Amino acid sequence: MFEFKDCIDVAISLCLKSIIEKSKSAHILLLLSSMILLPENNHMIDVIKKILNRMFKNSKDHVIIGITKTRLVETHWDEDEIVDVAAGVNGETRNFQGYTIMIVEQDNVESINNVLDEVFKKRCIKK
C-alpha cells in the first residue's frame, strides 16, 4: 500500500491515509515552511512530490501547496517572489510546478480565507 522510506514519508502517508480512510471525501491542503525553498533544503520538494504522486492519481488536481513562515526567508526573496520560486517560474529545477501554490500566514486572516476558498474549489478526493 504505502512505502515508508524516511520520516517525512511516514508522517505524510500516515496522516493522509488516516484522513481518507475516515472520511468519504477530503480536500487536501499541504502546509510547508518557506524554508523548504532554500537550496540546502529543496531536495525535500522532490521527496514530497514523489509521495503525493504515489498516494494520489493526478495529485496536482487535488492538492494545494500552502507556503508558511515566509518571514524566515525574507533575506532571500520578497513575499511575491516566494510563490514564483515554489512554482519554478525562474527556472528552479526543484519546484511544485502545476500545483496551486499560495502563501498562508497564521496571523493574516485574509490569507487563510483565500487558501480555504481555493481548497474548496479543488476536486475532492473520494473513496
Image (cartoon, helix red, strand yellow):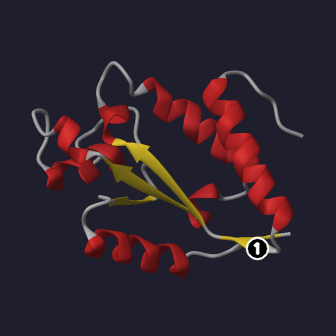
Residues packed near mark 1 inside 10 Å, few (<14), some (14 to 19) or many (20 plus) = some
Where residue 117 sits, quadrant-wise, is bottom left
Q: Is residue 52 left or right of residue 97?
A: right
Q: Is residue 110 left or right of residue 48?
A: left
Read off the residue under disc 1.
25
As shown in the figure, which amino acid type bears the numbered disc 1?
Ser
| In the image, residue 44 above or below residue 33 | above
Expressed as whole percent of the image width and height from the top left, the position of residue 10 reads: 71, 32
- In what element is the residue under mark 1? strand
Work out which residue is located at the far front of the displayed protein and give it. 107
Q: Please give the name of the residue rendered at 63% of the width and 37% of the height, measured from the top-left corner.
A: 50
| In the image, residue 16 above or below residue 41 | below
Q: Please give the name of the residue rendered at 66% of the width and 41% of the height, measured from the top-left corner.
A: 12
Locate the C terminus by quadrant.
bottom right
Locate the N terminus by quadrant.
top right
Work out which residue is located at the far right of the displayed protein and give it. 1
* Front-lying residue, 90 or 46: 46
Q: Please give the name of the residue rendered at 38% of the width and 24% of the height, measured from the top-left corner.
A: 41
Expressed as whole percent of the image width and height from the top left, the position of residue 14 reads: 76, 42
Expressed as whole percent of the image width and height from the top left, the position of residue 70 reads: 24, 46
Q: Is residue 73 left or right of residue 10?
A: left
Expressed as whole percent of the image width and height from the top left, the position of residue 97 reads: 42, 50
